[in-house]
Image (tube, rainbow, N blue to C red):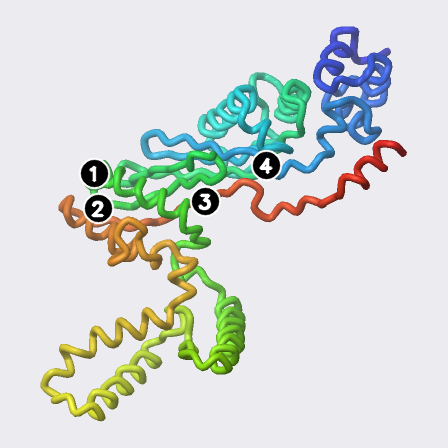
């Protein structure tokens, strides 16, 4: 005896836009299981939603929700940017963001395996695909949660293509409350400047070594061309990250700088006034990787005389406390997705086949 009835066939047809007999066959093969029936239709390439679900979804939008000491971020992909702009898509994204926020989900796989509105999430999404007319994918999600001494904020760029959530650990609840506004400024900074990690301490040693070798080769090749043109050569740095500037290295640098001051005839009595600035300049010249990729070490876009870390420390001090950024999540729509490029003639030929 079949484990489904006419109502199930009708529901599957609404979800997938497949034919009535195809839906009946799918439910028969799946023994009445709706998710397996959708999968069966997809495997057979039957039904609009089944076919749409095979399309690469590399466009879409980022959604966030920040409330109290918690924030979540979701990347919902679609096939075209046009669909990502319509109200139905926006409503679906908002519903998913609230679902993630309510359930404290931190991983897209968990979201996709969950239940929403009393139905399996896969079934819910298939229905949205059938309604909106394009494949939809919950690709990435993230969450940040803290206690009363944690300030949390977030920012989504106007085009909805980039979003950031960020957390700051403070010495007190009072400081945390004061730091919410400055923290949003840092979230905006992160959206624009694309940091990949929080601190140089997060870098793997092999990654730093490979980056150093690659950058040196690149600059040396550029210098060959500059020399040919009779132009000033670029400085070839020995290091690119604070991870390489050990106490031993900095000790040697300090001795080298002292030798330079001595050679310049500078009185030894003023060396201690000059050395800090020269050492800071050396560190700046030899930590380019950190300045490019580490949020804390980037020059703050609203005041490039400070790093992001220095900006936050200054704001916390003004509030009578201390604070330190402890985590952030930055998502940009479609990062890392490869979309096959086909010319128009090939596409027409496929349609004619």
Element on which disc 4 rests: strand
Q: Which numbered disc, 1 or 2, marks the residue that appears first in the sequence?
A: 2
Relative side of 102 to 168, left or right: right
Q: Which residue is mark 4?
A: 59
Q: Which numbered disc, 2 or 4, marks the residue that appears first in the sequence?
A: 4
Q: How many marks?
A: 4
The correct choice, above or below, for 316 with respect to 61 in the image is below
Q: Residue furthest front?
A: 229
The correct choice, above or below, for 136 with respect to 284 in the image is above
Cα gap from disc 3 to disc 2, whole angstroms: 25 Å
Element on which disc 1 rests: helix
Depth order, front residue of 302/272: 302
Depth order, front residue of 290/101: 290
Q: Which residue is mark 3?
A: 330
Q: Which residue is mark 2?
A: 171
Res 178 label: 1
The correct choice, above or below, for 100 with respect to 325 in the image is above
Q: Residues within 10 Å of mark 1 (few under 14, many from 20)?
A: some
Element on which disc 2 rests: loop
Cα gap from disc 1 to disc 3, whole angstroms: 23 Å
The residue located at (87%, 32%) in the rendering is: 352
Marks 2 & 4, CB-CB < 8 Å contact: no
């Amino acid at each position: 005896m079949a484990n489904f009835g006419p109502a199930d066939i009708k529901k599957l047809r609404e979800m997938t836009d497949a034919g009535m007999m195809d839906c009946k066959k799918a439910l028969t093969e799946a023994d009445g299981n709706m998710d397996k029936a959708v999968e069966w239709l997809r495997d057979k390439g039957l039904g609009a939603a089944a076919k749409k679900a095979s399309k690469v979804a590399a466009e879409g939008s980022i959604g966030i929700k920040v409330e109290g000491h918690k924030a979540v971020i979701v990347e919902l992909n679609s096939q075209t940017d046009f669909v990502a702009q319509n109200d139905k898509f926006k409503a679906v994204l908002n519903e998913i963001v609230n679902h993630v926020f309510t359930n404290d989900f931190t991983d897209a796989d968990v979201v996709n395996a969950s239940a929403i509105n009393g139905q399996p999430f896969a079934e819910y999404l298939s229905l949205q695909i059938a309604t909106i007319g394009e494949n939809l994918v919950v690709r990435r999600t993230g969450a940040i949660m803290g206690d009363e001494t944690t300030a949390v904020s977030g920012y989504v760029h106007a085009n909805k293509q980039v979003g950031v959530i960020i957390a700051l650990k403070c010495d007190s609840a009072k400081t945390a409350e004061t730091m919410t506004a400055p923290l949003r400024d840092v979230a905006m900074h992160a959206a624009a400047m694309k940091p990949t990690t929080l601190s140089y301490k997060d870098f793997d040693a092999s990654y730093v070594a490979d980056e150093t070798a690659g950058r040196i080769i690149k600059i040396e090749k550029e210098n060959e061309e500059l020399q040919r043109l009779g132009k000033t050569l670029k400085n070839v740095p020995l290091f690119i990250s604070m991870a390489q500037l050990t106490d031993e290295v900095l000790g040697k640098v300090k001795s080298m700088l002292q030798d330079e001051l001595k050679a310049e005839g500078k009185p030894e009595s003023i060396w201690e006034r000059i050395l800090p600035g020269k050492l800071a300049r050396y560190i700046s010249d030899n930590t380019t990787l950190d300045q490019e990729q580490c949020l804390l070490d980037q020059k703050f876009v609203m005041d490039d005389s400070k790093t992001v870390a220095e900006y936050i420390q200054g704001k916390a001090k003004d509030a009578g406390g201390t604070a330190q950024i402890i985590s952030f999540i930055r998502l940009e729509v479609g990062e890392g997705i490869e979309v096959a490029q086909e010319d128009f003639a090939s596409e027409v030929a496929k349609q004619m086949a």
